[in-house]
Amino acid sequence: MTYQQRYISPSVAMTTAFGRSIGRQAFDGLVVALQGDLGAGKTHLAQGIAAGMGIGGTIASPTFTLLNDYVQEDGLSLHHFDVYRLEQADELEGIGFYDYGTEGVTLVEWADRFPEDIWPHAIWIRLERTGADTERGITVIVPERQITWWKGVEADVVGAGYVRTDLDGCVDGR
Ligand SMILES: Nc1ncnc2c1ncn2[C@@H]1O[C@H](COP(=O)(O)OP(=O)(O)O)[C@@H](O)[C@H]1O
Ligand SMILES: [Mg+2]
């Protein structure tokens, strides 16, 4: 069983604000699997998540480093992957990928390259251009055990007017 919803973000600032809400409510073990073309907004959402977790400064996309780690003394750590440059799933082992996903918060950009290797408790977020200049569609698929948590995030971001919903949120039998 999963919960699925699509949100519409009108601007880069609102995508970042959406991320901040996720980050403010982040919990130990949260995994966010991000998908979307180059320039879709994955890193901006990730920057919002980091800011919401209290991680200061700008966080860069780990396109070349594969992993950027942000360790906090008084807070959750953030493990930010970008697996775009990996060619095969067996390279994940070499970068220590499977040691993550439980402690702190793990974000994976281009997670759809290796969907079989992403933890089953991951929240999947797909960003896409809608055609309107700075608008992005943000489709979220939430596994059963995270649905109650996600509804809290959703209430926050929709209530604040950061994004609007585009679907009747549906719980399916997947
Ligand atoms: N609503 C929006 N949400 C996110 N980014 C947007 C939005 N509208 C325009 N943009 C622009 O799209 C680009 C997204 O870049 P980035 O977050 O690095 O994408 P990705 O990590 O998916 O390649 C930035 O140049 C940003 O300014
Ligand atoms: Mg990126």
Image: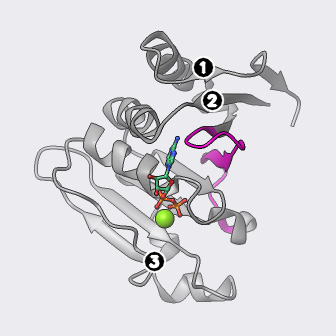
Residue 63: numbered disc? 3
- Mark 3 belongs to which amino acid? Thr
What residue do we see at 38% from left, 83% from top? Answer: 65
Picture colour scheme:
one colour
Q: Is residue 100 above or below residue 149?
A: below
The numbered mark, 2 or 3, whose residue comes first in the sequence reads 2
- Mark 2 belongs to which amino acid? Ile
> Is residue 131 inside the magenta stretch?
yes
Mark 1 residue element: strand
Q: Which residues are magenta?
A: 117-136
What residue do we see at 42% from left, 38% from top? Answer: 19
- Alpha-carbon distance for marks 2 and 3? 26 Å
Asked if marks 2 and 3 touch (Cβ < 8 Å), the reply is no
Q: Position of residue 47 (x, y in %)?
A: 35, 51
Asked if marks 1 and 3 touch (Cβ < 8 Å), the reply is no
Label 1 vs label 3, nearer the camera? 1
Asked if ligand 1 lies within 8 A of label 1, the reply is no
Task: From the image, tell me which residue sits under label 2.
Answer: 8
Q: Position of residue 32 (x, y in %)?
A: 53, 49
- Alpha-carbon distance for marks 1 and 3? 30 Å
User: Farthest top residue?
Assistant: 159
- Mark 1 belongs to which amino acid? Arg
Asked if ligand 2 lies within 8 A of label 3, the reply is yes
Q: Position of residue 79 (x, y in %)?
A: 37, 62
Asked if marks 1 and 2 touch (Cβ < 8 Å), the reply is yes
Q: Quadrant of the C terminus?
A: top right
Residue 143 falls left or right of residue 41: right
Task: From the image, tell me which residue sits under label 1.
Answer: 164
